[in-house]
Amino acid sequence: MRIAKPLLLVSTPVGVGLGFVEAWRVGWWLAALMAAMIGLLGFFSALTVRRIRAERREDDATAGR
């Protein structure tokens, strides 16, 4: 895990960037669809993390009473 985690943190954004370049070569519309999909995934991931953190704060507040 000591090597895999940093490797994934670097290779994933590089791979997505190269994927955008290749999608643009096929057609601008494909790159736009890819950007929309990644944007939606990011939005819903952030929404999920926000909900989990809010529920943890709520649980910690009720447990602290």
Image: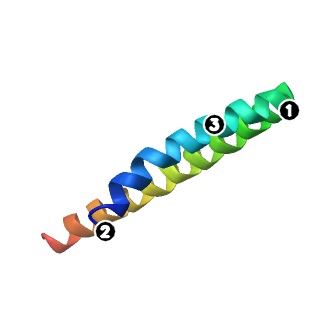
* Category of crowding for the residue at label 3, using alpha-carbon neighbours closer than 10 angstroms: few (below 14), some (14–19), many (at least 20): few
61 over 32 or under it: above or below: below
The total of numbered circles placed on residues is 3
> Which residue is more in the foreground, 22 or 36?
22
Q: Residues within 10 Å of mark 2 (few under 14, many from 20)?
A: few
Res 1 label: 2
Spatial CA distance of label 1 from label 2 is 36 Å
Q: Residue at x 86, y 29 (%)?
A: 27
Q: Is residue 33 left or right of residue 43?
A: right
Q: Is 12 left, or right, of 34 in this rendering?
A: left
User: Residue 5: x and y, percent?
Assistant: 35, 59
- Local SS, label 3: helix
In this view of the protein, which residue sits in the foreground, 22 or 37?
A: 22
Q: CA distance from mark 3 to mark 2?
A: 25 Å
**Residue at point 37%, 62% (across, down):** 4
Classify residue 51 by image quadrant: bottom left
Q: Residue 54 location, x and y as percent? A: 35, 57
Amino acid type assigned to the residue bearing label 3 in the image? Leu
Q: Quadrant of the C terminus?
A: bottom left
Residue, disc 3: 18
Q: Earlier in the sequence, mark 1 or mark 3?
A: 3
Amino acid type at mark 1 = Val
- Viewport quadrant of the N terminus: bottom left
- In the rendered image, residue 26, in percent from the top left (x then y), is placed at 86, 32
Q: Residue at x 62, y 49 (%)?
A: 41
Q: Quadrant of residue 3?
A: bottom left
Depicted 57 relative to depicted 12: above or below: below
Upstream in sequence: badge 1 or badge 2? 2
Q: In this figure, which residue is indicated by the disc labeled 1?
A: 26
Q: Quadrant of residue 33?
A: top right
Labels 3 and 2 touching (C-beta < 8 A) = no
